[in-house]
Image (spheres, rainbow, N blue to C red):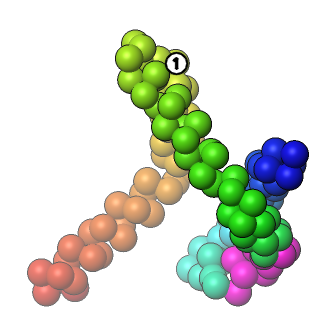
Amino acid sequence: MLRKTCLLAESALAVIIAVCLIVSAMEIYTEGLARKTADPLAWIYTREAVSEKLAPVVPLFAVFAVLALAGWIAGVSADVKTRIGREFMTARTRRPNGILRAVILAAALCFIIAGVFNGSARDVFYKAVNICTECVGLG
């Protein structure tokens, strides 16, 4: 019973941490865009801005580490490894599922298109040009 409870708590906490990180990243991005429109040459993604947004997530990581330690002591990790090993061996004998690949490819294409439309591709190109010219010695 302790193993199952610990595993469920770790899983739920992992999902909560993932959601918090996604929300924090979106807040950092939107605030950075707002500052960039006000001052195009300003440093917008600083360590201070990131640490301010990610500070509330740190206690969740600490709780997750404590739960992981408790699970390790209770032997949950060994049980999970044997289950995953069995499922992996049975999955290798089945035909690979292409739905997950298609979903990941579609998400990647959406993010690439969004980056092109918001001007990030231009910024990356300028940075690459500057790095190359500095490396050669022209800049």
Query: Is residue 19 among the parts visible in the rendering?
Result: no
Q: Quadrant of the N terminus?
A: top right
Q: Is residue 100 above or below residue 44?
A: above
Please give the name of the residue rendered at 77% of the width and 66% of the height, measured from the top-left corner.
70
Please give the name of the residue rendered at 38% of the width and 17% of the height, measured from the top-left corner.
93
Q: Is residue 95 above or below residue 14?
A: above
Task: Write the start and end of the magenta stretch as one range.
Answer: 48-59
Residue 46 placement: quadrant: bottom right
Q: For the view shown, which residue lies furthest in the left direction?
A: 136
Q: Where's residue 111, x and y in %? A: 54, 42
Foreground pick, 31 / 17: 17
Q: Main secondary structure of the magenta part?
A: helix
Q: Where's residue 58, x and y in %? A: 78, 76
Q: Where's residue 63, x and y in %? A: 82, 70
Foreground pick, 73 / 26: 73
Foreground pick, 64 / 126: 64
Q: Is 115 inside the magenta-drawn segment?
A: no
Q: Which residue is mark 1?
A: 99
Please give the name of the residue rendered at 39% of the width and 23% of the height, measured from the top-left corner.
92
The amino acid sitting under disc 1 is: Ile
